[in-house]
Amino acid sequence: MKHFVSHLEAAIDGTRLPFGTIQNLHECRPIWVRYDLDAIRSAVTPADIAKRPPSLWRYRELLPLPLDVEPVTLGEGMTPLLPCPKLGKHLGLNRLLIKDESQLPTGSFKSRGMTAAISMAKWLGITRVALPTAGNAGGAAAAYAARAGIECFVFMPEDTPIVNQFEPHIYGAKAFRVNGLINDCGKIVKDGTATMGWFDLSTLKEPYRIEGKKTMGLELAEQLGWTLPDVILYPTGGGTGLIGMWKAFHELRTLGWLPANTKFPRLISCQAEGCAPIARAFEKGERFAKLFPNATTAASGLRVPVAVGDFMILNAVRESGGIAVVGAEASIVKWMERASSAEGISICPETAICLDSLENLIRDNTVSFDETVVVFNTGAATKYLEALPVQLPFLDRNQPIDWAKLS
């Protein structure tokens, strides 16, 4: 067995835990995966990685699955980092880039976490998993579980977007709607663990989804020639991707794969005004976020009223010199249409919140026109049919067409 994991580490107090055993939380808080970075530095170089297929599994040495074990994969490739000059000009930015995660196998960034988590679950001998979902995680978990031959249970709020309801079902999971929010669904998963014998695959309640998500940061650095942007805007629900990228940047710096003078990007955590526990805690200078009451937003992936990794998100944002901000609910449709039509990218509601936030940050000079700014598009617009109530004009083929009115 070949891997480069040195140990697991409790995020709340640094307790060292063994790798290769089934773990969920320590003291009700998440667990980090730690690597022997000196050994990785001797084993692989950026030049070696560049020769590998364009998959997130090209970073095998920086992922926990042993190198002699086949991953559970659906062919998740590197996602494009797309220059957006028209949208950038509209916002007043010289260099705006969108990292388009909608092109992953399950249509969102959740593919990253699930390929890693399900691969590790299979290796550890887990045969049944369960998770709550606010949207895309359920479909991704079901797809990878089906690929692995693992039984999957998914619990979601009853008003979860219809496409997200359909996906776990079609992938063979046992999916249920719940009269509550994602934290209520999470309680069902927790309460059923002893009776049902499932492994809790919830966001940050196992160590490995974050390792899959951190490949966003590894890819971003590689795509920019092993440099980093000035600013990253990231839609934050559970926050696994933001935390994972911050971890990735630190690992890359320790490895020496980034130039010695590389400055880490400012991380901008973006939430919707209808559910903004992280932004509230940031504003108040608090280490932990409080439960956000009556959470509601069309950006369903952001409807996470309490996050088990709240302190990890806030630590990363503050250490980066970044900020946690709130975008307007009323801006979602406007930015989905404006950005998608300007650049041909399928912009999801969560990313629309980022773009509204970015406009505000540029207006108040928190972000300047000459900075390199990366916005993460975490999913495809087509997964959110309810967010864009569109009715196309009707043409009667039996009547003369007034061509002038078509333009």
Image: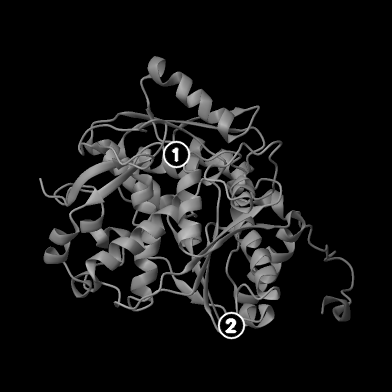
User: In the picture, which quadrant includes the C terminus?
Assistant: bottom right
Element class at badge 1? loop
| Badge number at residue 85 | 2
Residue 25's image quarter?
Answer: top left
Query: What residue is disc 1 on?
Result: 171
Residue name at image x 41 percent, y 43 percent = 143
Q: Amino acid at mark 1?
A: Tyr
Q: Answer whether residue 106 is visible to the viewer in this image.
A: no
Q: Is residue 167 above or below residue 357?
A: above
Residue 222's image quarter?
Answer: bottom left
Residue nearer the viewer, 114 or 43: 43
Q: Is residue 375 above or below residue 186?
A: below
Residue name at image x 44 percent, y 34 percent = 172
- Coordinates of residue 246 in the picture (x, y in percent): 40, 59
Label 2 Cα neighbours within 10 Å, binned few <14 / some 14-19 / many ≥20:
some
Q: Answer whether residue 160 is visible to the viewer in this image.
A: yes
List the single residue furthest toward the front. Answer: 285
Left/right placement of residue 330 relative to residue 212 reads right
Element class at badge 2? helix
| Badge number at residue 68 | none
Q: Amino acid at mark 2?
A: Pro
Tell me whether circle 1 and circle 2 mark residues in contact (CB < 8 Å).
Answer: no
Residue name at image x 32 percent, y 47 percent = 116
Left/right placement of residue 157 relative to residue 33 reads right
Eye-nearest disc, 1 or 2:
2
- Coordinates of residue 159 in the picture (x, y in percent): 67, 37
User: In the picture, which quadrant includes the N terminus?
Assistant: top left
Q: CA distance from mark 1 to mark 2?
A: 38 Å
Q: Is residue 4 above or below residue 396?
A: above
Residue 118's image quarter?
Answer: top left
Residue nearer the viewer, 221 or 56: 221
Q: Is residue 218 above or below residue 187?
A: below
